[in-house]
């Protein structure tokens, strides 16, 4: 993933999900799985009694079918992240976007028995999701989610990603904006996840999963 932190923050702020009550809620989201790192992530979430949302890739659902089923059985939310994760293929046309999402949705339901309309497109909805693509996925009934906290765990493999999450969450907290945190199913992320969860719990957050009734965080 390329570095687009400033754009991410600016866009996500303008469409941030604000809490309608006094409770502090944070949403942990994980992209690109499932894989072996997901197992450790799930173990940590269970230990902290936290829920997460997993935006999964179609080949990984087949390859790690037991892990995908475990995600569902343990009550986490699932979303679609496409098949190829390649810009020139996923975003080739409106039809390619819808086709990859449809295939991933079919596989998810076949493997886990769970259907979903939550989606996150590769690298987020900017810059590759054309307005016509966005219109098409919404017309198809999907909820397109971006994020407002980027851990940059694709770039950093140490506590710098934890510090980024902490700094950004505190910024959003001042405006009563619920953090939607982007992470990936990576070994380093799995190893450092307890640090993030401990921080969020100490600040009074409950960790919940995304659902179709929420207004998605969007860069647009």
Image (cartoon, rainbow, N blue to C red):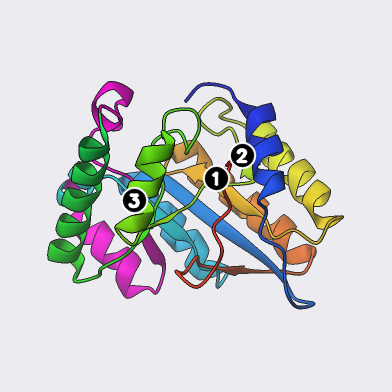
**In the displayed structure image, the side of residue 37 where residue 20 appears, left or right:** right
Q: Which residue is mark 2?
A: 150
Q: Which image quarter is the C terminus in?
A: top right
Front position in the image: 165 or 100: 100
Q: What is the total number of numbered labels drawn onto the structure image?
A: 3
**In the displayed structure image, the side of residue 32 where residue 1 appears, left or right:** right
State which quadrant residue 128 falls in. top left
Front position in the image: 175 or 66: 175
- Does 219 lie within the magenta span? no
Q: Position of residue 162 (x, y in %)?
A: 67, 41
Which residue is pictured at 36% across the width and 61% down the height? 78
State which quadrant residue 110 falls in. bottom left
CA distance for labels 3 and 1: 21 Å
* Circles 2 and 1: CB atoms closer than 8 Å: yes
Q: Nearer the viewer, mark 3 or mark 1?
A: 3
Circle number at residue 182: 1
**In the displayed structure image, the side of residue 5 where residue 22 appears, left or right:** right
The residue tagged with tag 1: helix, strand or loop?
strand
Which residue is pictured at 20% across the width and 39% down the height? 95
The residue tagged with tag 3: helix, strand or loop?
helix
Front position in the image: 182 or 166: 182
Q: Looking at this rendering, what residue extends furthest in the right direction?
A: 174
Which residue is pictured at 55% across the width and 34% down the height? 153
Instruction: Look at the image and give the residue range highlighted in magenta.
Output: 63-92
Closer to the chain start, of discs 2 and 1, is 2
Front position in the image: 153 or 102: 102
Q: Position of residue 194 (x, y in %)?
A: 61, 54
Q: Is residue 111 above or below residue 86?
A: below
Q: Which residue is mark 3?
A: 137
């Amino acid at each position: 993933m390329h570095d687009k932190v400033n754009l991410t923050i600016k866009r996500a702020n303008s469409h941030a999900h604000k809490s309608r009550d006094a409770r502090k809620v944070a949403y942990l989201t994980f992209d690109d799985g499932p894989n072996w790192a997901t197992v450790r992530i799930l173990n940590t979430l269970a230990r902290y009694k936290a829920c997460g949302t997993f935006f999964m890739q179609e080949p990984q659902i087949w390859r790690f079918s037991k892990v995908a089923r475990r995600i569902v059985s343990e009550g986490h939310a699932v979303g679609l992240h496409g098949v190829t994760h390649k810009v020139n293929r996923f975003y080739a046309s409106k039809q390619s976007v819808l086709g990859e999402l449809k295939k991933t949705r079919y596989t998810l339901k076949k493997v886990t028995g769970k259907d979903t309309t939550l989606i996150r497109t590769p690298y987020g909805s900017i810059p590759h999701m054309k307005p016509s693509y966005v219109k098409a996925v919404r017309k198809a009934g999907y909820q397109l989610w971006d994020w407002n906290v980027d851990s940059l765990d694709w770039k950093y493999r140490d506590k710098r990603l934890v510090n980024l999450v902490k700094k950004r969450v505190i910024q959003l907290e001042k405006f009563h904006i619920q953090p939607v945190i982007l992470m990936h199913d990576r070994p380093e992320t799995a190893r450092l996840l307890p640090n993030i969860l401990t921080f969020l719990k100490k600040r009074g957050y409950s960790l919940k999963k995304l659902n179709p009734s929420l207004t998605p965080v969007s860069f647009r």
